[in-house]
Image (cartoon, rainbow, N blue to C red):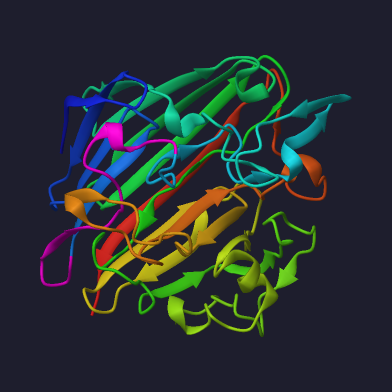
């Protein structure tokens, strides 16, 4: 196991960015930059040993600009959407930036995805630790939020992400990694033949602006039933209002849990052609399955690749969207004296 560090140039704001490379004995290689805590690349073997980079992204830090669709980044202070960019907490109303139509998305104009995190290699481990202090009033969120995140690559081909946070004032917290995966390779095009399983009997339907209606709807008998592995493309174009609203899958699934905060299997994806398999485990109550419906071949990625429509999918472990406005959803409010703790593990393997 080894971790190396190098300069990765500057971001769009002229700030210096570092790139960390984690490698294990099985040949798995993960590169993460300090800008946005971003997974820039992840090289994994196929069943025949052929390596491929399976996450979408860019070649330089400078290319991760405002319009980049959160490739590999950490989203927060509140990942996903907040209706009308508003929430009320302890009697005070907060207005956030409206950066997604009428809603606030992934922390606002300059969320955690567009800041440089303090980063260090943890000696004697295959871990990098990143820290960021989001000050009171940043993006109009209350409280000084201190967030620490650790990426660890294990010899069991696990990429482990641990998050911890503390605050000096009550504030919503919901953070996730926003990697776009394509198990055939980042430049392989449409992912519709890849198999998806999501360990959820319910999902949260949305209105036309992607805000949950508050209902927990059973997936059985719908296009959203991934309780057994099915090709992503099988039902993505079904005549379903939910699919029409989002242009395909872009929904929160309510994970089946035996207990709150249980680390359990959330999703499993497989590329039948290469045999690559990815499993996602999390302590979070939900996962957003997004099928890359807004990729349109106008965005240049790594090695000059123009990322095509639905050429990457996201599995964003999270609390439910708009939770500060929907008290029936799992609570996202962190208060002084409390600690936010979350873990997500991506495991990589192959099979016939």
Residue 86, quarter of picture = top right
- Residue 165, given in percent of the width and then of the height, sits at 56, 25
Between 133 and 285, the residue placed more toward the observer is 133
The foreground one among 171 and 211 is 211
Residue 48 lies, with reference to residue 51, above or below; the image says below
Give the side of residue 246 with respect to residue 19, left or right: right
Question: Which corner quadrant of the image does residue 13 belong to?
Answer: top left
Q: With respect to residue 257, does 122 lie above or below? A: above
Is residue 307 something that shows in the picture?
yes
The residue drawn where x is 79% and y is 63% is 215
Observer able to see residue 263: no
- Image quarter (top left, top right, bottom left or bottom right) of the C terminus: bottom left
Relative image position of residue 280 (x, y in whole percent) = 43, 57
**In this picture, is 311 found above or below 336?**
below
Foreground pick, 351 / 194: 194
Q: Which residues are magenta?
A: 46-66
């Amino acid at each position: 196991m080894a971790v190396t560090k190098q300069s990765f140039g500057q971001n769009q704001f002229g700030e210096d960015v570092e790139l960390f490379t984690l490698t294990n004995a099985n040949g798995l290689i993960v590169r993460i930059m300090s800008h946005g805590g971003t997974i820039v690349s992840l090289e994994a073997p196929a069943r025949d040993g052929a390596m491929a980079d399976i996450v979408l992204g860019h070649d330089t830090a400078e290319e991760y600009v405002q319009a980049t669709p959160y490739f590999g980044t950490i989203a927060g202070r509140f990942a996903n959407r907040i209706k009308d960019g508003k929430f009320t907490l302890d009697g005070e109303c907060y207005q956030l930036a409206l950066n997604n139509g009428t809603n606030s998305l992934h922390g606002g104009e300059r969320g955690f995805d567009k800041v440089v995190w303090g980063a260090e290699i943890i000696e004697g481990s295959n871990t990098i630790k990143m820290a960021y202090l989001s000050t009171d009033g940043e993006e109009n969120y209350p409280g000084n939020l201190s967030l620490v995140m650790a990426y660890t690559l294990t010899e069991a081909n696990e990429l482990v992400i641990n998050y911890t946070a503390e605050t000096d004032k009550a504030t919503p917290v919901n953070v996730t990694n926003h990697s776009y995966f394509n198990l055939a390779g980042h430049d392989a095009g449409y992912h519709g033949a890849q198999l998806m399983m999501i360990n959820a009997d319910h999902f949260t339907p949305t209105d036309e602006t992607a805000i949950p209606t508050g209902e927990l709807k059973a997936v059985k008998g719908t296009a959203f039933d991934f309780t057994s592995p099915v090709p992503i493309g099988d039902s993505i174009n079904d005549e379903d209002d939910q699919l029409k609203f989002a242009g395909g899958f872009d929904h929160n699934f309510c994970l089946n849990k035996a207990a709150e905060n249980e680390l359990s299997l959330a999703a499993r994806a497989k590329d039948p052609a290469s045999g690559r398999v990815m499993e996602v485990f999390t302590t979070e109550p939900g996962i957003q399955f997004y099928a890359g419906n807004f990729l349109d071949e106008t965005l240049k990625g790594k090695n000059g690749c123009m990322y095509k429509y639905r050429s990457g999918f996201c599995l964003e472990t999270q609390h439910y969207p708009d939770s500060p406005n929907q008290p029936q959803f799992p609570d996202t409010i962190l208060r002084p004296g409390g600690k936010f703790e979350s873990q997500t593990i991506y495991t990589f393997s192959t099979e016939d």
